């Protein structure tokens, strides 16, 4: 039912002039889903208040702006009241000129940023209704009204479908790696870092919140939860920041669908924060992230960092190291060029030195090309603990017998050997250990060079190649002479 509903929504939006891409479909579906979610949330709270004998419930949303009154009003027998249901220009004008301005005000009126009221205000301050036809909007509202956010099973199914939409959005655009990190990779990173209930988990480049969602799922299953555990997970565990409006909306919606009612995600440019201002209260036990790579930051943003560079991912790595508590753990995805780029006095070398001296970089997972569908870059995952210098690094190179891509993506089975060997840092055909004292102490080059891989192609010295070429040229000349002699006869 849910899958067909999502397909019908996309089909309706494709006919509208205002929604022109997969990104638009997800964005517009998100705000409508969010309002239906609020309707069901408030309906549940009314029942809870009644059962608890509290004598009433104070609605978050005012009467005329509740879903059941403007979106899909019903008759006494539960059918859509076509006399009351707005459509066409009436519906579009109400949404654009009354509903959105009303919802935006929640941000100013909310008691704090970790409330559902604040999230309502922030979401509707960051986006607009792009659906140009009120008739298309009516069609979408009717479809979404059939979706329910009541049981855990329904929320779970909806969350998976929403995740698929995010994945498709990433695959459809140029920003595949920006919006969607493969879930098998995230699950594996979470397993290795192993966050515990009572620890705080942070992603400063939160995107669609995949890391926070998977960490939440991992921690939920780590033990039998008490009421206090549930409250800690809901309100005092997961934190994120996101610069882009669309990703911010999607991240919040994804966390809500996965069971976190008021996600602690802030819409801000993480890199605009001066590292010198980060205090102990701002630090976290666990950091899980895939910061955007390939981006460039302005000079004024670079001034916030001790190691100046325009490369976005390098600035994020500095931010993450500073944001970890002493003894904190991190799993960070970064371009594999981080391991070797730059000479002795470069920003890259300084950053590697900073990481190795302030943290124990215990594991590097080297991923094959194609891991990030639609993003043609090779990446590694850095696993490190803050507080003591690195003495040795265990490397694992993921070597698969197939090429990764849209139709053949990474799966959890591909990473099983890595997870198993990582526990003991054992050597194998795909893994080895490097002593930090043995690397170049000026460049701190950590290039991935697997000494244990069998059947490696041995690269010949240039002078050997030139000798071979000269020998082949001589043989060609002799052959031509013979041919000419035969023809001459």
Image (tube, grey):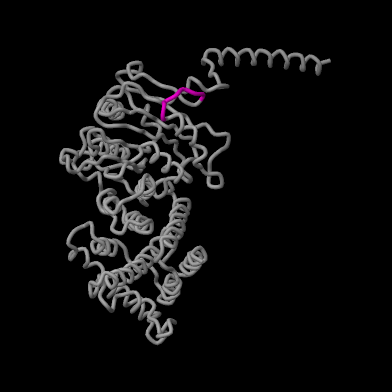
Q: Position of residue 454 (x, y in %)?
A: 55, 21
The quarter holding residue 76 reads bottom left
Residue 18 vertical placement versus 252 (above, below): below
In the picture provided, is 383 more to the left or to the right than 22?
left
In the picture provided, is 205 more to the left or to the right than 166?
left
Labels in figure, total: 0
Q: Position of residue 325 (x, y in %)?
A: 23, 37
Residue nearest the viewer, comparing 28 with 120:
120
Is residue 290 at least partly visible in the picture? yes
Residue 196 vertical placement versus 213 (above, below): above
In the picture provided, is 199 more to the left or to the right than 470?
left
18 inside magenta stretch? no
425 inside magenta stretch? yes
Residue nearest the viewer, comparing 77 with 317:
77
The quarter holding residue 359 reads top left
The quarter holding residue 468 reads top right
Q: Which residue shows up at 33% across the image and 69% down it? A: 44
Q: Which residue shows up at 23% across the image and 39% down it? A: 323
Q: Position of residue 91 (x, y in %)?
A: 36, 78
Q: Position of residue 288 (x, y in %)?
A: 33, 41
Most extreme residue toward the right is 489
Residue nearest the viewer, comparing 267 with 433:
433
Magenta-drawn segment: 423-429
Residue 92 vertical placement versus 287 (above, below): below
Q: Which residue shows up at 81% across the image and 16% down it? A: 486
Quadrant location, the C terminus: top right
Residue nearest the viewer, comparing 86 with 394:
394
In the picture provided, is 96 more to the left or to the right than 380?
left
Is residue 264 at least partly visible in the picture? no
- What secondary structure characterizes most of the magenta part? loop
């Amino acid at each position: 039912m849910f899958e067909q509903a999502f397909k019908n929504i996309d089909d309706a939006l494709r006919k509208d002039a205002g929604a022109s891409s997969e990104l638009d479909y997800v964005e517009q579906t998100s705000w409508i889903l969010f309002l239906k979610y609020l309707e069901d949330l408030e309906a549940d709270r009314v029942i809870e208040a009644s059962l608890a004998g509290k004598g009433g419930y104070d609605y978050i949303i005012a009467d005329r702006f509740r879903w059941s009154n403007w979106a899909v009003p019903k008759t006494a027998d539960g059918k859509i009241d076509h006399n009351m249901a707005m459509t066409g220009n009436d519906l579009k004008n109400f949404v654009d000129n009354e509903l959105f301005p009303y919802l935006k005000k929640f941000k100013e009126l909310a008691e704090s940023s970790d409330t559902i009221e604040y999230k309502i205000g922030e979401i509707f301050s960051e986006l607009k209704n792009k659906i140009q036809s009120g008739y298309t909007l009516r069609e979408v509202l009717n479809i979404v009204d059939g979706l329910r956010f009541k049981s855990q099973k329904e929320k779970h199914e909806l969350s998976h479908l929403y995740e698929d939409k995010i994945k498709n959005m990433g695959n459809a655009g140029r920003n595949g790696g920006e919006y969607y990190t493969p879930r098998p990779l995230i699950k594996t990173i979470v397993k290795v870092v192993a966050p515990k209930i009572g620890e705080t988990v942070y992603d400063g480049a939160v995107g669609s919140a995949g890391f926070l969602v998977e960490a939440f799922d991992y921690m939920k299953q780590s033990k039998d939860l008490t009421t206090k555990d549930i409250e800690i997970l809901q309100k005092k565990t997961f934190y994120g920041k996101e610069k882009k409006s669309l990703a911010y909306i999607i991240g919040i919606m994804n966390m809500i669908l996965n069971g976190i009612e008021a996600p602690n995600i802030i819409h801000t440019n993480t890199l605009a924060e001066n590292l010198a201002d980060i205090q102990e209260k701002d630090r976290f036990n666990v950091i899980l992230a895939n910061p955007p790579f390939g981006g460039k930051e302005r000079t004024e943003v670079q001034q916030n960092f001790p190691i100046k560079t325009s490369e976005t991912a390098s600035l994020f790595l500095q931010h993450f190291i500073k944001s970890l508590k002493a003894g904190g753990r991190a799993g960070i995805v970064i371009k594999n060029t981080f391991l070797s780029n730059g000479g002795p006095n470069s920003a890259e070398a300084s950053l590697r030195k900073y990481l190795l001296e302030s943290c124990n970089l215990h594991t590097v997972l080297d991923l094959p090309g194609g891991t990030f569908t639609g993003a043609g870059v090779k990446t590694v995952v850095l696993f490190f603990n803050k507080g003591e210098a690195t003495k040795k690094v265990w490397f694992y190179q993921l070597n698969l017998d197939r090429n990764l891509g849209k139709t053949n993506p990474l799966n959890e089975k591909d990473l099983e050997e890595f997870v198993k060997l990582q526990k003991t840092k054992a050597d194998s055909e795909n893994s080895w250990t490097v002593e930090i004292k043995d690397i170049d102490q000026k460049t701190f080059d950590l290039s991935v060079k697997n000494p244990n891989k069998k059947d490696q192609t041995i690269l010949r010295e240039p002078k050997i190649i030139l000798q071979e070429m000269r020998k082949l040229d001589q043989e060609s000349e002799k052959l031509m002479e013979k041919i000419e002699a035969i023809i001459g006869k």
